[in-house]
Image (cartoon, rainbow, N blue to C red):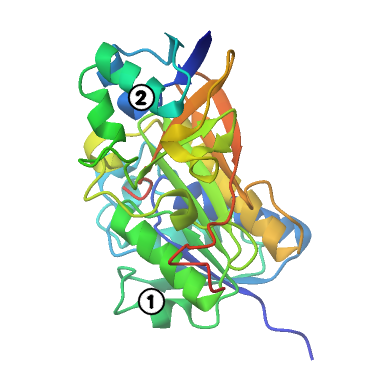
Amino acid sequence: MAITVKIPAPLRPLAQNQSEVALEAANTVGAAVDELGKRFPGLKDRLLDDKGGLRRYVNLFRNDEDVRASGGLTTALKDGDRLAIVPAIAGGSR
Amino acid sequence: MSRPAPILTLVGLGGLGCPALLSIAEASARLRLPLTIRLVDPDVVEASNLARQFLFSDRYLGAPKVLAARAAITRLVPSAPLTLEPQEARFDASTADALLAGAALFLDGTDDVATRFFANDTACARRLPLVHGAAVEWTGQVLTIVPGQSACLRCLFEAPPKRVVTCAEAGVVSPLTGLVGAAMASEALALLQGTRSEAQGSLLRWEGLDGKSRKLPLRRDPGCPACARC
């Protein structure tokens, strides 16, 4: 089983500047985050808080669906799924 | 007796506000659409702004952005039936009431995340439609919030981070701010004309490095502290 994780530009420095990462054997969103953390130290801390929950200013979309509405980190993944990381951004006035 | 022109409050006359304002002014001229646009920004024009804030040029260096923007629009789109109200102010709790008084629409192109969440919460409390735009480095986004009808910023992100990288720190790609600002204008015009816009209920997101855009559908959070009671 393989899924694809879309890395947004602000987090790419933590992921060896890759825009997409393929993960094997991640059957939940939480497992995918764990796998990302193993491969890219520092990335997991940007996604999860001290209690292991999704940070309040980061969201994840599985196949364009907000995972907060589908079980959060326990959301099941299947082969071919796409997981997009969407962090809050500001910027625009200066 | 004709109806008064709708009032738009545009906060932030930077990389997003400049293209948004010009696009709205051009549309106002073509559609003969009278508008009052309240221009809000506390800053003056600096040399570092000129690459992407294309309403400004050397002649405006040191001038308040709100006055420079009014002068530029008056010169560039003289036929637009616009009333431009410059307000040299920061949008915060002490100014929000006055800056949003009578407004039919709110456009947010500010540069810090706390102000963005404050803008969201204020718009929801007033049931005032808000077009949110943001851009930093290579990433841009637009979300149109119609309180009571579509998801707000807090339905997407529960709370702001303590800080995020801003354009002033990390920079932003000029074509991206033009694109996001123009999209904000398109959203505003759709709302003014009573049509459902692309970014109402969906986050439009651009990754300039990849040349890709995504439309992410959002659901309203029934427990949202900002909009659940709208």
Q: Quadrant of the C terminus of chain B?
A: bottom right
Q: Which residue is mark 1?
A: B96
Q: Is residue B40 visible?
A: no
Q: Secondary structure beneath disc 1?
A: helix
User: x, y percentage for residue B193?
Assistant: 75, 63
Label 2 SS: helix
- Determine the chain carrying the residue at label 2: A
Q: Residue furthest bottom?
A: B1
Determine whether, in the image, residue A21 is placed left or right of residue B217: left
**Amino acid under label 2?**
Val
- Looking at the image, do the residues carrying marks 2 and 1 touch, with CB atoms under 8 Å apart? no
Within 10 Å of disc 1 (Cα), the crowding (few <14, some 14-19, many 20+) is some
Quadrant of res B24: bottom right
Choose mark 2 or mark 1, whichever is in front. 2
Which residue does the numbered mark 2 point to in the structure image? A33
Q: Residue at x 38, y 50 (%)?
A: B14
